Image: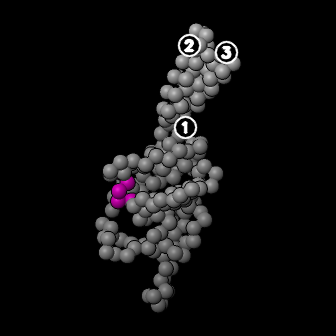
Amino acid sequence: MNYEYHYTKNKEEQKCSYTSEISSGYPTDDFVAYSYSYRYKWVKMIDNPIERCVFNEGDEMRLTNLSLQIEQKHHSREIDLDYIKQVTLQFRRIMFPLIFGGLLSAFSLIGLLTGVMKSALALSLVLGGIMLFYYGYKGSYQLMIELQGGQVALFIDEKTPELKKFIARTNYYLHRKF
């Protein structure tokens, strides 16, 4: 992160611009630097972009000096940084297909072997249950945003180096010392 100060003779024209290798794509002339040890609610601070990450083919997260903004295809949300404890990327197995697929395949196999169900229906239910079980066992990555009063989980298609950098940068910005 590089700060560049532009000084002129007129104090009203002084600007502070922000450049970074990671957060390309943001205008650099709009950065306003604040030097407070605490974020006062009565100070109308400008939302300065710090970091940006694209995930899941078009979904986007932006870290600003005031909030973490998440824009997905169907909705968007903004979480104030004062309420965020930590951001992590976790691998989790999906429980509903795992349990439902295991039960469906087990009961269909019992029905097939005892002759209660027709063989074509029972065999297709056994195969469908096995596929559901595999899908649940395969799992997926989730971006966990731990808040003071709970957590927010976002499904992530794949774990990329850009996403890891964004998470590391976000956690650094959350826990920095003033």
Prevailing secondary structure class for the magenta stretch in the rendered image: helix
Decide which of tag 2 and tag 3 comes sooner along the chain.
2
The image shows residue 125, relative to residue 85, as above or below, that is above
Alpha carbon separation for disc pair 1 and 3: 33 Å
Q: Point out residue 19 in the picture as x, y percentages from the top left corner.
A: 54, 67
Marker disc for residue 119: 3
Left or right, residue 138 beside residue 174: right
At label 3, which amino acid type do we have? Ser
Alpha carbon separation for disc pair 2 and 3: 11 Å
Is residue 106 located in the magenta-colored stretch of the structure?
no
Is residue 82 located in the magenta-colored stretch of the structure?
yes
Do we see residue 106 in this rendering?
Answer: yes
Q: Nearer the viewer, mark 1 or mark 3?
A: 3
In the image, which residues are magenta? 81-85
Marker disc for residue 110: 2
Q: Point out residue 93 in the picture as x, y percentages from the top left corner.
A: 50, 32
**Are dots 1 and 3 in contact, CB under 8 Å?**
no
Q: Which residue is mark 1?
A: 140
Left or right, residue 156 beside residue 45: right
Q: Nearer the viewer, residue 126 or 147?
A: 126
